[in-house]
Image (cartoon, grey):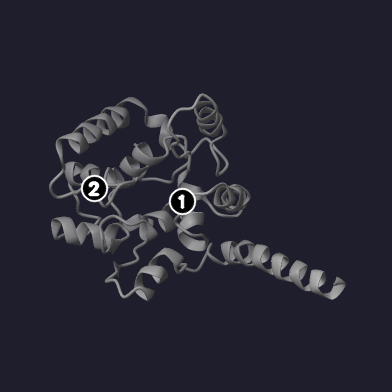
Amino acid sequence: MRPILKALGAVMVTVVLIPLILTLAYGVKDPPSLAIWRRQADGDTVVQTWIPLTEMSPELVRGVIMAEDARFCLHWGIDLRQMRLVVKEAIAGEAPRGASTITMQVIKNLFLWPERSYLRKAIEVPLALWMDLVLSKDRILEIYLNTAQFTGSAYGVEAAAQQAFGRSAADLTRDEALALATVLPAPAARNAARPSKRQRAVIAHVERELDRAPWVFTCLAAPFRP
């Protein structure tokens, strides 16, 4: 019995260490994504073109932060304030909603499974704290914007921009950038090229917030600070 427990313990330690070590490597190496691998293993078409953050439209980068995680520059990988609100809402019997930060979504895309569960969240939290500790905010954002799903087949902003507008993510207009940014987190229901009335309302809200709250981007390098 003891050898079996030791073997199980060794396996668990290895499983924990792998993402910790890989996260360090991803500071300089562009990572693969389990989410993309799963799609490819199922025989689905996946389009992805990795580009550096500096080749993305600043309007797009800021729009994604404002739409997805406006406290990105203020937290350490997890947003405790949002998590407390979610817990209170759950206790009150309200419909559950996510409290994932951009960093937590990167962890999910690179290492974990897509289905929501308390187990996945329990793994995401310490890994997100670790990622925020060892990687810069710019690098975390770069990984996210290259691995997030924007359409049924496009992963990353470059493939999505080419698919939706026929141009590079660096050359998007402000309107195009915000339309693409607000596709997240519902790429199956939203369309950057033809935004619905509801999505246009989201775009208008994000645009107002961008003009009202430049402090949201203080952790980013130029030219992404307005």
Q: Marks 1 and 2, Cα distance to the nearest angstrom?
A: 19 Å
Which amino acid lies under the numbered mark 1 shown in the image of this protein? Gln
Residue 72 in the image: state x and y as whole percent.
47, 40
Q: Secondary structure at mark 1?
A: helix
Residue 224 can be seen, yes or no = yes
Nearest the viewer among 65 and 45 is 45
Number of other residues with Cα within 10 Å of mark 1, as a class: few under 14, some 14 to 19, many 20 or more: some
Circle number at residue 105: 1
Which residue: 58% across, 66% down? 22
User: Left or right of 152: which side holds 10?
Assistant: right
Residue 221 in the image: state x and y as whole percent.
43, 46
Nearest the viewer among 115 and 179 is 115
Above or below for 46 versus 150: below
Above or below for 129 versus 151: above
Which residue: 63% across, 67% down? 18
Residue 89 in the image: state x and y as whole percent.
49, 27
Q: Secondary structure at mark 2?
A: loop
Name the residue that disc number 2 marks: 189
